[in-house]
Image: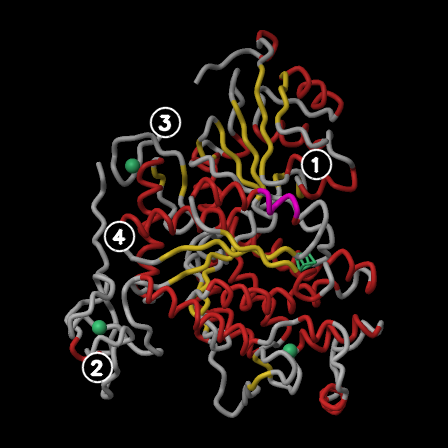
Amino acid sequence: MVNMEPSMKESINIKVEFKGGLEMLFDNKLSLDINSKDIEEYLKKQETKTEKLRMLDLINYLSTLIKPNERDLFVDDKRLRAGILVLINDTDWELEGEGEHELEDKESICFISTLHGG
Amino acid sequence: MARKCELCQANKAVLKRPKTLQAICRECFYLVFETEIHHTIVQSNLFKPGMRVAIGASGGKDSTVLAYVLKTLNERYNYGVELFLLSIDEGIRGYRDDSLETVKRNQEQYQLPLKIISYKELYGWSMDDIVEAVGRKNNCTFCGVFRRQALDRGALMLDVDHIVTGHNADDIAETILMNIMRGDIARLQRCTEIVTAGDGCCKRSKPFKYTYEKEIVMYAYFKKLDYFSTECTYSPNAYRGFARTFLKDLEAIRPSSILDIIRSGEAMQVKSEIELPKQSSCERCGYMSSNRLCKACVLLEGLNRGVPKLGIGKTKKSDWDKLADEQNSSSDNSGAAQMMVKFDELRLQAQKQREERLLLNGKQGGSDGYYCSGGGCDAPQKITCCSKNSSTKQNCKNSCGGTSDSCQSDPIEATTVVSSK
Ligand code: SF4
Ligand SMILES: [Zn+2]
Ligand SMILES: [Zn+2]
Ligand SMILES: [Zn+2]
């Protein structure tokens, strides 16, 4: 694990994908490129300070992109709603620390809803 | 540090199994996922060689993965079954039309014959029409009743012996919870069964009964299977929605909850004093029904007469009877009743198809019975026919002169899993 001072941290880019119907919450966009500066700005507004950017921060930032009346289809009390699967670089996030996972440059994160009909 | 797979100890783990909490790699995941389904199929005796099996295909994740896995297993373990895709077109713009496109692609990708049955053709009403007439309140009642019957009709048209559906462990646990909350004992029992008898047309089964939704979705993701995932435009489903959220929350805390609920559901047996409704057949269309008219015919009658409330909720038995009598006395069976082909007719056609197929195979058509491997017929290679224990002798279905007790074959054996690594 590399530990950097917050001030020295360079911005990182991550790719986010939506599947299983979740894209409908995000203007039907199947993927988004997110820069860590966006997340940090959001966190500043929330007056939450974090040394490192975690998955949870990303999730809460993403929820701000959703229409207010649909947000609870993605988050539940600031956590990811149960029934949404997450892969970090094609690995189940349950093996990667889930919400506490520290975001890294060029990581690709995929959210898949299992809640839609089969 | 990437975690190693707990099964092969070699590759990088990519998935945590909800059932066992093991961290496993992609290859091991494919193998255990497929093999567990194979074991369910073998242990529940779902298939016999020569069987024609329809996969209820919606284009969604479950049925797409089911089609892919069954095709794979049928080849790997030589089940000797013939697979078909059977889809229902409810007629819902912006939902079913798109998902049917997915089914059509699946047909190409998996090279399986596809049959689509539409509500509009069958009942004269699409779901779009029905919603326009009844509003957004009871639409799912119509849709559910019509779907059940449409599937059985489709099965007869394809002359299949068996319909498999993609209901997974999460779906079944959810249905158990809902039936408990509604006190629906008859359904509670039926929903936990892996095989249900159907109405004498053909059996239905759920090979994914013990398969977690998470694994189905992950399998589709890793294999890049093409599925459709939009909610029906008319889905209200508040009740199911709550049950689903509740279940997913439970599962997040303790994944075994899903299988535990299924086990509890199985353990709840109907006490013998409680009588389940007797089944006979509908006077109008011949479908199985506990009343003189089946639910679909009553609902349809309501639609055609412009009183869609008919048959919704509790209808007095005398009303049903009145409807049935009216039906019998009127000489011109007005409306859709005429359009609906009776089940007896469908059964006859299926029988004919079967005889033609047998003739094509150079065999004589026989009536229902058993296959054997004695008597010199070349019925499918490995046969589970019979009833070696059965006390009565049955004639071989192929009319070869053999009987069921001359069968020398063994049931399909469960193949032991050997890790590929
Ligand atoms: S949500 Fe209701 S109307 Fe839509 S497909 Fe399902 S049962 Fe039919
Ligand atoms: Zn492995
Ligand atoms: Zn009927
Ligand atoms: Zn024979």
Q: Which span is picked out in magenta?
A: B97-101
At 77% across and 87% down in the image, what residue appears?
Answer: B330
Real-space Cα distance between discs 2 and 4?
25 Å
* Mark seen at residue B2: 3
Q: Is residue B98 magenta?
A: yes
**Same chain assignment for discs 1 and 2:** no
Label 3 sits on a secondary structure element that is loop
Tell me whether circle 1 and circle 2 mark residues in contact (CB < 8 Å): no
Determine whether B119 is above or below B336 in the image.
above
Q: Closer to the N terminus: mark 3 or mark 2?
A: 3
Label 4 sits on a secondary structure element that is loop
**Same chain assignment for discs 4 and 3:** yes
The amino acid pointed to by label 4 is Tyr
* Mark seen at residue B77: 4
Q: Closer to the N terminus: mark 2 or mark 4?
A: 4
Quadrant in the picture for the C terminus of chain B:
top left
* Mark seen at residue A25: 1
* Mark seen at residue B389: 2
Q: Nearer the viewer, mark 1 or mark 2?
A: 2
Residue B173: x percent and y percent? Answer: 52, 62
The amino acid pointed to by label 2 is Asn
Real-space Cα distance between discs 4 and 3?
34 Å
At 47% across and 56% down in the image, what residue appears?
Answer: B55
The amino acid pointed to by label 3 is Ala
Q: Closer to the N terminus: mark 4 or mark 3?
A: 3
Assess disc 4: are there few (<14), some (14-19) or many (≥20) residues with their C-alpha within 10 Å of its C-alpha.
Answer: few
Asked if disc 4 is less than 8 Å from ligand 2, the answer is no
Q: Nearer the viewer, mark 4 or mark 3?
A: 4
Q: Nearer the viewer, mark 3 or mark 1?
A: 1
Real-space Cα distance between discs 3 and 2?
54 Å
